Amino acid sequence: MREVSIKFISKKISIFLLLIACCLLHVSSFAQQRHKIAILTPLYLDSAFDASGNFRFNDKNYARFVNPGLDFYVGAEMALDSLRKRGASLEVHVIDTRSRKGLSNQLNSAELSNVELIIAQSNAAETKAIADFAERKKVPFVSATLPNDAGVGTNPYFVVLNTTLQSHVEGIYKYLQKYHSLDNIVLFTQSGTQEGQIKEYFTDFGKTTNSVPLKFQVVDVANVTNPARYLDSTKKTVCIVGSMDEDFGTSLAAELGTFRKTYPITLIGMPNWSNLNFTKAELKEMEVVYTTPFWYSRTATPLANKLTAEYNNRMSTSPGDMFYRGYETTLRFAMLLLDTKKDIASNLTRKGNTVFTQFDIQPVFKDRNNMTLDYFENKKLYFVRVMGGVKNLLY
């Protein structure tokens, strides 16, 4: 019977996983041809052990900086276990991106000489290095967590799964065109490079839209003493938070909230608002809408219930979003590799194999004049409405 084989680049990972009570997958060899996948995530194994191989931390202290990478790994491991039970023929190499060996040395190791798919939870510098490696090898690289292109261009093997800020802004613009085109729309902003980008994205998309452009005001809060002057008591005012600064967003919400009984307000947040505590007073009484490329309901489906229970049993705690991200990314793209075999790079935009999230992977062309494919990006956005601290999916 064929199995999924996991080979760990770092030998220390098996000790670490025993300590945190994860189930280990054994290494076995097969004569038949298997498809090879590399999964990269920050596990900080070298930081966890001293020169004698002794664990440096207690579990609670270590969990503070290892949890996201560990959750991503455990999710990937559970997905691979599911494939193993179906008889999948895979060889998977797990790379600790925080290893002292260095990312470049691990990528260029003999074990990855014929890798066919790369999945990573990585920062910007790591993403760029992995994307360059994937382009040289001509194998797809799925960036599962970084919400930007890391400066990568003209690379048809690079997939941005965590939708970029520009696509979020364009999605919000289309949403406003569809549902709030007749409302009073105000983009509140502050000085800053990213804030300037958000403003530019809104303005530029209005110039290229095939529909009627929105009419909206841009207001720098540093120059405003009374935000009420931009609100309208006769119709809804849609207030867009034009910044990824969470403190700016919550302060703006608190100030606008003082006028909500007189002026009907809907607050549009940025994609990082999925992390906010909406039970806080400044947000709880506001109608908030924000976008996210991932939507995980931990008890909405039998699969979610099963995975949550299994994670709780292994880790004695509840899973974070990175667990579900690791699970669905690994399962979906491993299945795509198995379905398409050597032709996965030509099928990155294929729909289907939905686990939790409906991905809409499309080619991105930064320069429309020469139409050179720069990378692929997930363009699917979920719109979430929050009222009274309760989140509900709009669509």
Image: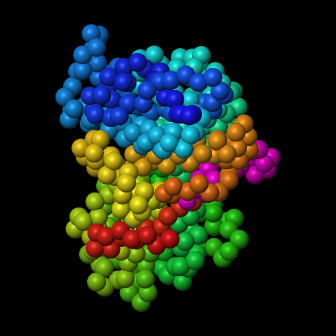
Q: Which residues are magenta?
A: 358-378
Query: Which residue is farthest top?
Result: 52
Q: In the rendered view, tell whether residue 156 sits above or below residue 290.
A: above
Question: In the displayed image of the protein, which residue is found farthest to the right?
Answer: 370
| Viewer-side residue, 157 vs 53 | 53
Decide if residue 153 is in sight here. no
User: What residue do we see at 56% from left, 29% from top?
Assistant: 91
> In this view of the protein, which residue sits in the foreground, 140 or 372?
140
- Residue closest to the far front: 1
Look at 56% across and 48% down and name the residue there.
332
**Which quadrant would residue 60 be assigned to in this image?**
top left
Give the quarter of the image for residue 69. top left
The secondary structure that dominates the magenta segment is loop
Percent position of residue 163, x then y:
54, 52
x, y percent for residue 272 = 41, 54
191 lies left or right of 338: left
Instruction: Pick the residue in front: 262 or 133.
Output: 133
What is the x, y in percent for residue 343?
73, 40
Is 3 magenta? The answer is no
Residue lying at 31% horizontally and 70% vertically, measured from the top left: 390
Residue 374, position in %: x, y?
A: 69, 43
Give me the residue at 63% from left, 46% from top.
336
- Residue 360 within the segment the image draws in magenta: yes
32 over 368 or under it: above or below: above
Foreground residue among 28 and 17: 28
